Amino acid sequence: MSEDVEAAGRRLVMGTWVCFNDERHQVVGHGGGQVHLRSAAGEWTTIYIAALAAAPGFRLVSESSVELLSPDVDTGALLDALSDDKAAAVRDLEAHLNEMWKGYRSGESERAEPGEPRPPYDPVLVPNLSDRLETKAAELGVSSATMWRKLRRYRAARREGLVDGRGPEVGNPLARADQRVLDAILAQHRVGEREDSTGGLNRFYRRLQDRLDHEHGPGVVKLPSGSTIARYVEVLLPGQYTFGRAPSRRSAAARPQRSYRPDEAVRPGQVVMIDATPLDVIAYDPIGDVTHKVHLVLAIDVATRTLLAWRMTVGDTRAVDVVMLLNDAVTPEPMRPGWKQALAYRMLRLPITREVDMEERLELAAARPVIWPETILVDHAKVNLSDALREACLDLGINLGLARKANPTDKANIERAFGTIREDFAKHVAGYKGSDTASRGRLVEHAARWSLEDLEEFFAEYVVAIYQRRVHSGLIIPGFPELEMSPNRAYSLMVARYGYIICPPRSHHYCKRLPIEYRTIRPEGMQLDYLIYDDPILDSYRRAISPVPGKGRKWPIRYNPGDPSRVFIFLENAWQVLFWTHLPDPAIPFTARMVEEARKLLRDGGLREPSQQEIAEALVDLQRRMDAPESATARTRRELVRAREDARAIKRDQARAQFGDQEEPPPALTLVPPAQAEDPDDAGDAVVVDLSELEEFEIWDPGAPPRGSDSA
């Protein structure tokens, strides 16, 4: 049916609108001298072309190709959207149909108006509906067929069936477009513009013409004007920012073409998300008089929205930072000088704190819940795919899950947390540089005045005093949808339902996160990366057989890649620390970067195999030059800042671990602790308790308002 049809000198093509029987129809097909019509109401008609052209009132409405409204359109919404005049017309038509059908404009004899029923529409006097319909058609000035159609619609859908769903004629903006051009626009956006820098309409127009010439031959497909192409792009790619900002374009491309919901969890630790991002704040080092970028690595519990742990680093986040974040997540945050006592951990309104004896180390801890993760969700960043992180998760019994590539909605909770931190914390810090160059101020480095250590203190207080205590609009607790929840309060409610575990990190939690190497315990010590480590505890193990099968005399040692000052070995049922035999002043920052720089200086001087003493002397010389402001360059000052921050982070991690003590197995995951064993010597000393003097235990109500300033 590719040929057009002539009707009374007028062309009928597919999609043409005609007026027939006082109603608009669209041509949807023709053949064999007949034409197939579909009315605006969705009714089908087949009629000979000659009869159509000779029909009274037949006329051509439009030659533009437009689509009919779907027959499944919500007619109730169309009725609700009518103007007052059109709504009154629908009600008036309904009254006419009721009068014709039942004799009463209201449709009910109980609500008859004066003079009803009128004789021409009285079902008793005129029992034939066809006769009453002819009279009503003459009264309204329409054909009988039109009245029959309106009556059928009214019987089927009542008042909603009388709504004219045709609406204004809307032309398809792509009706006359070359399909090859439309396909090329979609392909060019997908493969050329989505990931590229923004180039504007001119570049897109040129690339589009080049693509068409390559696919169809030079000059075969001519492009319309640039303004027309821009309209095509607006229709084909709505909300894709083809000529907008590159970050917005990439974000729109990564948006899943489906409805999505973030991961849900119903108990603390069920799902914990870890991610890293630039903090958008510039830190200042007063010693080196240099500024540097700051990255934030964060862990958030999905069920309670609690920020379990965080670390700030100079420069990019490393794998060891992510691994040590696990240790921080199960470690209480220490109280800082100057913090209000109301922020202490013991002030959390936990319903079982009177039943469970809290450890002494928790009494001065900040009110950040300590949660043991069950599953950790990370993205595909290189630092998250390290063997050290996988081994740490295996050691702790934590499942490691990976989000899908290019699907930021898989980690929506932590991405939103980063946005909250930027709005509530980063923007209010001196040295805020904005999230991109478009929002960056002039000379923002000059405004930076806080060191990395200061920023960590500020951020820790923000988390404990503000974030954890403020109502979170996205926190909906199963069973209590009406409660307004803060992360601390959600933790209090959930811990009463599911229980919790106090998980004190010991030295095995720290050392087992570190990489492992095998070395022989020689008379002078153990050598790793050309550095010798020794301690008197090795005296009885020198040249001894390793306890690891198949390793001969090589013993396993653990080391921190960023801290060459010491290694760790498990002897006598405890982790022992072995220091470098030529370790300089421990108060001076000492990192792997500085050792490598010292070796480079010695190699440049002609020493291919530098001795331990030569490395130590070169290291001290490098430290002195880096510490001298008059001889330091910007590069050496930044290197010293990073070395100092690395050393501070390492010192903090090691301070949290207890070395040299007998190792105990990790605590069992139980709600009620085991009963203390009774001392036989005290068995005879019976304690008499006066029950009248006991304080009545408070009944914990999750819906009760917070009590005092210490509640979360």
Image (spheres, rainbow, N blue to C red):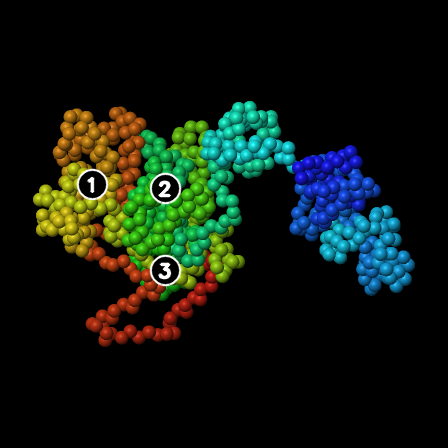
Q: Nearer the viewer, residue 704 or 570?
A: 570
Do the residues bearing badges 1 and 2 touch, measured as CB atoms within 8 Å? Answer: no
Q: Disc 1 marks which residue?
A: 565
Q: Residue at x 31, y 44 (%)?
A: 386
Residue 118 lies, in percent from the top left, at 89, 58
Quadrant in the picture for the N terminus: top right
Q: Residues within 10 Å of mark 1 (few under 14, many from 20)?
A: many
Whether residue 398 appears in this view of the structure is: yes
Residue placed under numbered mark 2 in the picture: 381
What amino acid does circle 1 point to? Answer: Ser
| Image location of residue 184, percent across then percent down | 53, 32
Secondary element at tag 2: loop
Q: Determine the CA span between mark 1 and mark 3.
A: 37 Å
User: Can the viewer see residue 308 in this picture?
Assistant: no
The percent coordinates of residue 350 (x first, y second) are 40, 60
Disc number at residue 657?
none
Q: CA distance from mark 2 to mark 3?
A: 31 Å
At 32% from the left and 30% from the top, the residue drawn is 289
Q: Can you identify the residue that label 3 sits on?
A: 500
